[in-house]
Image (cartoon, rainbow, N blue to C red):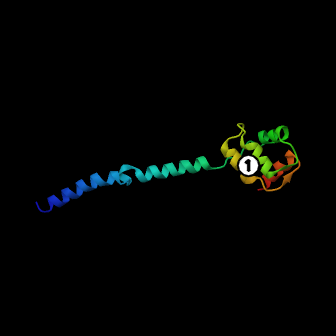
Amino acid sequence: MQKLIPTTFFMLATTLIAPSSGGLASGGSVARAETGSAAQAAAAAEKPDLEKLGQHLRDHQKYPATRAELLASCKGLVDFSPAEKRWFAEHLRAGTYGSADEVLKAIARK
């Protein structure tokens, strides 16, 4: 009987405490890991369709254009997703570009 009471108390305590602590019993760690990877996937840059990008740069951009001007003009575009815009910003080096072809060459180098 002396061993039964502490064992029962321990089982009740772990049953009541473990789920609320965010341990594996409640799926807390697993849920946090899944949420973290989903957030990382959403934040990841995505390479845009280069034909579509080239067409946009030829039709809608005035040259010469600096990196800052190119990024500012693409900021409000709905044709490209935020992930595609992020990729473009990450791959476009500082400088002044004289044409869409120069921009495309610059992003292809990185």
As drawn, which residue projects farthest toward the bottom? 2
Residue that appears at 72% across and 37% down: 79
Residue 76: where, in percent of width, then height? 72, 40
24 relative position to 97: left or right: left
- Tell me if mark 1 has few (under 14), some (14-19) or many (20+) residues whose alpha carbon lies within 10 angstroms of its own: many
Numbered disc total: 1
Residue 8, by quadrant, is bottom left
- Dot 1 falls on a residue whose secondary structure is helix
Q: Is residue 80 above or below residue 93?
A: above
Q: Is residue 54 above or below residue 107?
A: above
96 relative position to 25: left or right: right
Residue 105: where, in percent of width, then height? 83, 51
- Mark 1 lies on residue: 88
As drawn, which residue projects farthest toward the left? 1
- Nearer to me, 59 or 29: 59
Residue that appears at 72% across and 53% down: 90
Looking at the picture, which amino acid does disc 1 mark? Phe
Residue 43: where, in percent of width, then height? 61, 49
Where is the C terminus found, in terms of image quarters?
bottom right
Where is the N terminus found, in terms of image quarters?
bottom left
48 relative position to 12: left or right: right
Residue that appears at 54% across and 47% down: 38
Residue 78, by quadrant, is top right
Residue 34: where, in percent of width, then height? 49, 49
- Nearer to me, 74 or 87: 74
